[in-house]
Image (cartoon, grey):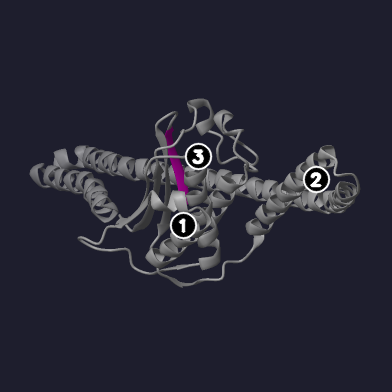
Amino acid sequence: MRDRRSVGLGILTAVPVGLSALGAGGMMLAGDQRILAMELALPGAVLAAGALVSCIPGAILLTRTVGARSRRRESAAVEAAGEAAALRERERHQRFLGRLDHELKNPLTAIRATAAAAQHETLSPEWRTVDAQAGRLSTLVRDLRKLADLETRPLELEMVDLEEVISEAIEALRQQDPSAGARLDFAVTRVPWTVPPLSADVDLLSLAIDNVLGNAAKYSATGPIEVRLREQDGWAVIDVADAGRGIPPSDVVQVFDELARAQNARDVPGSGIGLTLVATVMRHHGGDVSIRSAEGSGTLVTLRLPIQR
């Protein structure tokens, strides 16, 4: 398209010069010597005017080209500044999580040891509560540290069969929660084509899929759980759908934030880190995760991975 546009402008530029040259030559040939001597300036003026007109398209093209290049440079500079700011923010956040883990690990260990000794001596229910809450806080700190490590961990890539990875995650869930496993159905779309093996970190993918399946089991005490694998427009797509309690509309926008938990999920144990881990794993693989939910009806979580990175 750009080549055809350049050719068109070249023709448009040459036409006025050619026409003016022909006109000037005709005028000189048509006049006699006396008239030719007096009117010699007029053909020159016509030729000069034609040349001036010919310059206009070139000037317009030059102005547009310079303007477009300037806008592209400005856009690239803004984008680079945004990426640099995001990188600095992630690094700052990772340092904070590292300090948090370091500062809390020893006090929590001491609290749990004291609570365990007190329970052994007094059999007090209050100490059991202290131990349980300290254990919950220890798990939270551990998950935050795991999230910080994921941000910087290099991918250990290998060719991965997604159907096999999902099947193993489903089998693990069935062993941990037989009632949820009995409600789970796995479907793979193979027509007109199936999902080919793709380059990925199998441990991280398993972590992400385990989290999504675990959420579906936790928040749907009854009703089916459906897992679907398909190829769509060069992406491997994994859908995990449940018929559980769903998420209130006001909470859907923040479910991928650290420590975020829906208002109707406070009675279920959890740290609020799971979906953040899933989003991090997907981002590292060049993919993404999205969620659709209706309170009281269920939730659909969709993971997408590029088949060719």
| Label 3 Cα neighbours within 10 Å, binned few <14 / some 14-19 / many ≥20 | some
The residue lying at 38 percent from left, 40 percent from top is 223
Q: Residue furthest left?
A: 30
Q: Which corner quadrant holds the C terminus?
A: bottom left
Label 3 to label 1: alpha-carbon separation: 16 Å
Disc nearest the viewer among 3 and 2: 2
Give the magenta range.
287-293
Q: Earlier in the sequence, mark 3 or mark 2?
A: 2
Give the image location of residue 13, x and y in percent. 26, 47
Give the x, y percent position of residue 266.
Answer: 61, 33
Q: Looking at this view, is 54 or 203 the one in front?
A: 203
As helix, strand or loop, the secondary structure at mark 2 comes to: helix
Kind of residue at disc 3: Tyr
Disc marking residue 131:
2
Left or right of 143 in this view: 43:
left
Instruction: Give me the residue at 52% from left, 33% from top.
Output: 253
Q: Residues within 10 Å of mark 2 (few under 14, many from 20)?
A: many
Q: Is residue 288 magenta?
A: yes
| Label 1: few (<14), some (14–19) or many (≥20) C-alpha neighbours in 10 Å | some
* Residue type at the position of mark 2: Asp
**Is tag 1's residue or tag 2's residue first in the polypeptide sequence?**
2
Question: Overall secondary structure of the magenta stretch?
Answer: strand
- Quarter of the figure with residue 167: bottom left
- Secondary structure of the residue carrying tag 3 is loop
In the picture of the structure, the residue carrying the numbered disc 3 is: 219
Mark 1 falls on what kind of element?
A: helix
How far, Cα to Cα, is label 1 from label 2? 29 Å
Q: Is residue 259 left or right of residue 20?
A: right
